[in-house]
């Protein structure tokens, strides 16, 4: 099981599309060189047991479809270091019997019997295990490789991703914009906070830290959408605003405190 190191900045400007366009046009930030961006569409589904045993253990089981590639991943045990980078355990690989067995073992679900492994139907296989979908989301992602120009013949230090995340709940699509910075290895961990700071200085006031993963952000929106009916000229889609982010953080804090008391 590997460990990943990343930091997320949410967009707080009123024109996130222009901000993303500006960042994608950069070829360097401070000492870091950025590659020509590549774009893709990502469809994610998260699964859990009926009792929510994975989330209760601080784990998340994700099935990701990107182009013709399907991956199964298990993430969890998150913690934030003093520099603001999120550290978490991760197992991820192309859909196969082997990756399914590894994920079930690491998640404590090894006792589940796989009635049928369906190579062409990963979601059906997981449903056959008694797991249910707890979140669906569509994401438009623009990736840029990061190279530290100070390191002679240095390889890729990490990745900068511009993510436009669409959550559909209560008949409304909520759109969340964030920039995810991830180190390629433990040796490059320092790049994460360093590049985030440079970005915030390059675009003052337009970016701020967002210490919550996409899963919990979506679950909060799902829970809150019924409490705060959409009041907007375009009720079919809402760009998540500062007011909504405050509600999301309050919801996350409340549920986190409740778990601690248990």
Image (cartoon, rainbow, N blue to C red):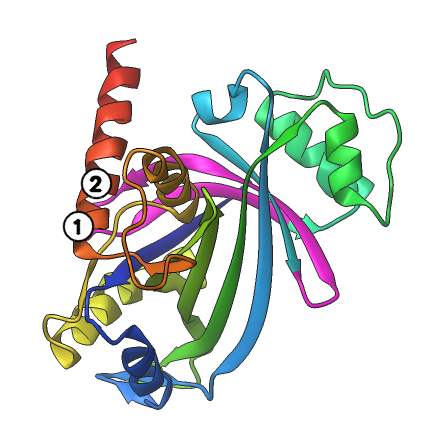
Q: Which residues are magenta?
A: 66-92
Q: Residue drawn at (43%, 58%), measured in percent from left and top?
A: 236
Q: How far from the left and from the top, in percent, is residue 136?
A: 56, 46
Label 1: few (<14), some or many (≥20) within 10 Å?
few
* Residue 222 in view (yes/no): yes
Q: In the rendered structure, are the residues bearing label 1 and label 2 in contact, judged by CB atoms less than 8 Å apart?
A: yes
Q: Along the horizontal axis of the image, is 254 left or right of 78? A: left
Residue nearer the viewer, 161 or 12: 12
Residue nearer the viewer, 145 or 1: 145
Image quarter in which the N terminus is found: top right
Q: Along the horizontal axis of the image, is 85 left or right of 201? A: right
Q: How far from the left and from the top, in percent, is residue 66?
A: 65, 63
Q: Residue furthest top?
A: 262
When the figure is inspected, residue 166 is found, relative to residue 56, above or below; the finding is below
* The stretch drawn in magenta includes residue 87: yes
Quickly name the residue at label 2. Answer: 247
How far apart, in angstroms, are the residues tagged by discs 1 and 2?
6 Å
* Residue 150 in view (yes/no): no
Residue nearer the viewer, 238 or 211: 238
* The stretch drawn in magenta includes residue 215: no
Q: Residue drawn at (52%, 21%), measured in percent from left and top?
A: 52
Quickly name the residue at label 1. Answer: 243
Image quarter in which the C terminus is found: top left
Q: Residue drawn at (75%, 25%), measured in percent from left and top?
A: 129
Q: Quadrant of residue 201?
A: bottom left
């Amino acid at each position: 099981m590997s460990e990943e190191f990343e930091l997320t900045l949410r967009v707080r400007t009123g024109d996130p599309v222009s901000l993303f366009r500006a960042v994608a046009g950069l070829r360097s930030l401070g000492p870091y060189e950025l590659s020509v961006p590549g774009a893709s569409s990502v469809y994610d589904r998260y699964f859990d047991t009926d009792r929510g045993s994975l989330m209760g253990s601080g784990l998340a089981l994700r099935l990701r479809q990107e182009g013709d590639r399907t991956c199964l991943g298990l993430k969890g045990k998150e913690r934030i270091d003093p520099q603001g980078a999120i550290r978490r355990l991760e197992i991820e690989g192309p859909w196969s019997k082997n990756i399914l067995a590894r994920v079930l073992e690491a998640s404590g679900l090894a006792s589940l019997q796989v009635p049928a492994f369906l190579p062409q139907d990963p979601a059906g296989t997981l449903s056959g295990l008694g797991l249910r979908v707890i979140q669906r989301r569509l994401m438009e992602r623009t990736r840029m490789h990061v190279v530290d120009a100070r390191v002679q013949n240095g390889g890729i230090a990490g990745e900068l991703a511009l993510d436009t995340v669409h959550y559909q709940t209560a008949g409304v699509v909520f759109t969340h914009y964030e920039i995810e910075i991830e180190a390629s290895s433990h040796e490059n961990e320092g790049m994460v906070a360093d590049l985030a700071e440079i970005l915030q200085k390059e675009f003052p006031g337009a970016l701020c830290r967002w210490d919550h993963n996409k899963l919990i952000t979506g679950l909060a929106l799902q829970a809150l959408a019924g409490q705060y009916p959409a009041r907007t000229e375009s009720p079919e889609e809402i760009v998540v605003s500062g007011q909504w982010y405050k509600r999301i953080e309050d919801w996350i804090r409340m549920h986190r405190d409740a778990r601690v008391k248990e």
